[in-house]
Amino acid sequence: MRNLITIAVVVVIGLVAFNYFTTGEFKVLPGSSMSPEERDVNRLKGDFRRAAQEYRQAGRQAGISGMDTTAAAEIALTTVAGVERDLKFLRKDTSDPKVLESIDELLEDVKKFKHDIS
């Protein structure tokens, strides 16, 4: 019985973590009440977070092992540039103030990331 409860708790924690990283909200199940623009922003936020993490990981691998990780870093930077481009495009087509605020926050994060790596 304890094993079933432990498994259930681990599954719920896993779902909450997955939904937080993909939507930015602490929920067991993702909200279906989100507009298409909000879903796009959340997808782009996840893409940006993954690309930033991959860039940092490439830097760590190069520092630790001395391997050439420029290709991995370049792919991550290309992904960040694509996210920025998509956000600017989405910003032009959106009128929802909540979505615009999310876009502006994410654009600021992208700008800060680019400044930090340069």
Image (tube, grey):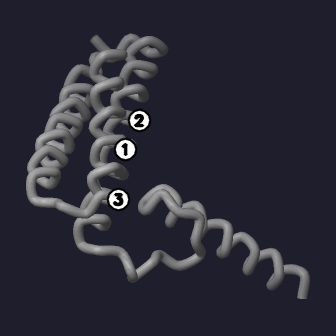
Q: What percent of the width, then of the height, locates residue 116?
A: 36, 16
Labels 1 and 2 touching (C-beta < 8 A): yes
Please rate how many residues cluster around mark 1, counting C-alpha atoms within 10 Å: few if below 14, some from 14 to 19, many from 20: some
Q: Is residue 5 above or below residue 21?
A: below
How many numbered discs? Answer: 3
Q: Nearer the viewer, mark 3 or mark 2?
A: 3
Q: Nearer the viewer, mark 3 or mark 1?
A: 3
Q: Amino acid at mark 3?
A: Lys
Report the residue at 36% width, 52% height from top. 46
Image quarter hosting the N terminus: bottom right
Q: How far is mark 1 from mark 2, CA to CA?
A: 5 Å
Q: Which residue is mark 1?
A: 50
Q: Which residue is mark 2?
A: 53
Please rate how many residues cluster around mark 3, counting C-alpha atoms within 10 Å: few if below 14, some from 14 to 19, many from 20: few
Labels 3 and 1 touching (C-beta < 8 A): no
Tell me the SS state at disc 2: helix
Q: Is residue 22 above or below residue 87?
A: below
Q: Amino acid at mark 2?
A: Gln
Q: How far is mark 3 from mark 1, CA to CA?
A: 23 Å
Report the residue at 37% width, 44% height from top. 50
